[in-house]
Amino acid sequence: MNRLGDLRLHATLRRAAHAVAVLIGVSAATFAVAHASGDPVTLLLPPSASAASRLELAQALGLDQPLPLQYLTFLRHVLTGDFGRSFLYRQDVVTLVLDRLPATLLLAFTAFAIALLISIPLGVLAASRGGLAELALQAVSMVGLAVPSFWLGLMFVLLLAVRYHLLPVDGYGGASHLVLPAVTLALQSIARLSRLVASGMRETLGSDYVRTARAKGLLEYRVVWVHALRNVLVPVVTMGALELGDLISSAVVVEVVFAWPGIGRLAVDALNARDFPLLQGTVFIAGVGFVFVNLLADLLCTRIDPRIAAGAATR
Amino acid sequence: MRVRSWLGVAGALLLALAVLAALLAPLIAPYRPMQLDLRARLAPPAWLVHGSTRHLLGTDNVGRDILSRLIWGTRISLSVGASAALLGAVVGSTLGLCAGFFGRRIDAAISWAIDVQLAFPFTLFALFLLAVFGGGFLPVVGVLALATWVNFARVVRAQAEVLRTQDFILAARSIGVPTPRILVRYVLPAALPSIVVVGSFSAAQAMLTEAALSFLGVGVDPTTPSWGAMLELGRNYLQTAWWMAAFPGLAIAWVVLGANLLGDWLRIRLDPRGGALR
């Protein structure tokens, strides 16, 4: 047990170091793109401004420094939570993004929960029973991967809200406002995850330990839902983290369709107003959040399957 | 297995029809995509009340023929999808080869780049990039390739890593074949089936993302009839003219489904064990 604890600690440290390396990359990429967005001096000063006042502003903003130093300054600001101010809203970018983040997370996690609740049983049934479940899986995965989520959302709005007034069309409020956007967002994930569960389950059901479990007379549902499922869940958790990233990415479009006040809508508003600090802050904070989600998923995997901790520590 | 290959044929057929529509657009589209018919604004599809066979799928808010615009729109969707997949394939496969074949340093660097790329919610990152560099065909393709190269790099990397220690590669090395030649002549052909499969899925992904970006207003070009942009426009007329939004979405689903089905089928045909491609 102690040895396993050591391995876990080692694996955790490795993963954390990796996360830091990725964070550095994320910040460098964001900085590089923002730098390419143009000279803030020309944006802030009228064209008639004199060369001296341009230079003065450049110095005040630190733009006369060499690029690596500017990056370090950017990093220092970011670490203290300073992402500049939004032109559009005349507020700190951090406040704006953190205000909107809960709405996006609520949407993404609800969609994720819906996706897990549907795709795990669907995948398991398709792999262990076949028949109708298999057919449903094929249909869902084909349609779910091809139909654009924003179109699906619009059709939901058209049929359920505009025609039959069953659910509210847009906005933010009680659970009824959450249903349409979350279901819309979940469909793609259901398609991907149920395929993953089904193929993992097919593979696991053919393995020796499952045969042993059956041979010793365990009930079939225990073999499938307890013994086999545990092994199937490892790739699901790893993919689940990527899936959350995809969900947050797709949420941008779904938020626009349903007028959901999350960071996706914020980013589109920033885009239309050419509000670069706000756009940069949104992208960066989303990226950082995703790195942490990934790290958590990695650590969760080592909990489910101790062999992974051993593998990561010795690699 | 037979159902599978039947689905693959269906996918190829869907794509072939779309390619045909793109090539023959000037001949088969009843109208030019920008042609206005102001007397027939918001005309419903032919089979509805007030519909007429002059506009089979109806018209939009300024009387442009939806069917014609869909046919012309095939050009954008397919060319963007194919270009993004191709560019991603070239960049991603090259980097994947290097990562899998050369030692740990290069592998670590490229794997790091993959992880950084995957850390950004892609739609947000794409919005940021296109806001900075402006829209248009090449920027959109470039940004989409940023999403697709990762797919190729991961698969090719895994294959190159396995091949590196195989006997025939060691043999080639021991008789002094230069490394670039080994990569191009022996490793790349072995990875080619996977590249084709990933290419099919990546094209589907790129077409879907292009539609999303056009929907958000940072697409190829506002003056060309892009399906995503048509959907965006149709969104404002959802209550009065549902066909403006409904048909472009079906067109997107058509080509994406085609590419996905083809990819599924190729995967089974070219890589029966499904090893590297999952």
Image (cartoon, coloured by chain):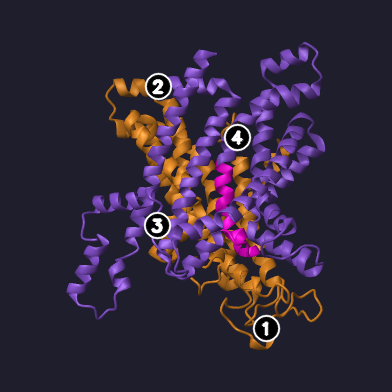
Foreground residue among A292 and B100: A292
What secondary structure is found at the residue carrying circle 3? Answer: loop
Q: Earlier in the sequence, mark 1 or mark 2?
A: 1
Going from N to C along the chain, the mark reached first, 3 or 4, is: 3
Query: In the image, is residue B121 above or below residue B25?
Result: above
Q: Amino acid at mark 1?
A: Arg
Left/right placement of residue A22 relative to residue A99 reads left
Is A252 inside the magenta-drawn segment? yes
Disc 2 sits on a residue from what chain? Answer: B
Q: Is residue B115 magenta?
A: no
Rendered hue of chain B is orange
Pointer 3: what residue?
A83
- Range shown magenta: A242-262
Mark 1: few, some, or many residues within 10 Å (few <14, many ≥20)? some
- Between marks 1 and 2 in the image, the one whose residue lies nearer the viewer: 1
- Relative to A276, residue B101 above or below: above
- Kindly indicate the quadrant of the structure image that contains residue B160: top left
- Residue designated by label 4: A237
Residue on which the image places disc 1: B41
